[in-house]
Image (spheres, helix red, strand yellow):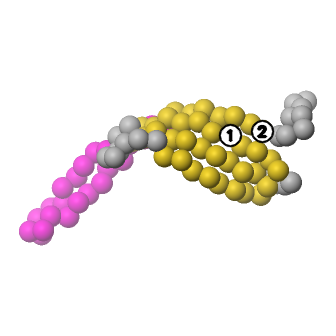
Amino acid sequence: EFEYGKLPIEGLVFADAGSLWREVARPDGTAPQRYYNRLRSVGAGIRVNAGGMVFEFDAVRPFDRQGGGWRFFFNRMPGF
């Protein structure tokens, strides 16, 4: 059995990758142009279970997106 101690905190580290096809309509009405995209990212975060609510703080670094740089997120959800 796992014991959290006085403050229930979990850490997380992740890597993510995916790919997708998308179609973009051409202004002249001819067949749409198809593009292949790949999306990759890494990140880390912590989750705190406080009074039955889970609070999550994440930092994500996308590699295949314009603007780059780190993005920070805060989520909350019920802990049941």
> The residue under label 2 is which amino acid type?
Ile
Q: What residue sits right under mark 2 in the picture?
A: 9
Q: Indicate left or right for 8 with 36 as reference.
A: right
Q: Where is residue 42 shown, x and y percent of the image?
A: 50, 35
Determine the secondary structure under disc 1. strand
Q: Quadrant of residue 37?
A: top left
Range drawn in magenta? 16-38
User: Is residue 61 visible from the viewing direction of this image?
Assistant: yes
Q: Residue under circle 1?
A: 46
Q: CA distance from mark 1 to mark 2?
A: 7 Å
Please tell me which residue is depicted at 54% across the width and 47% down the height of the picture: 72
Q: Residue at x 90, y 38 (%)?
A: 6
Q: Quadrant of residue 13?
A: top right
As drawn, 25 above or below 48: below
Residue 5 against residue 74 in the figure, above or below:
above
Quarter of the image with the C terminus is bottom right
In the rendered image, residue 23 lying in the magenta stretch gets the answer: yes
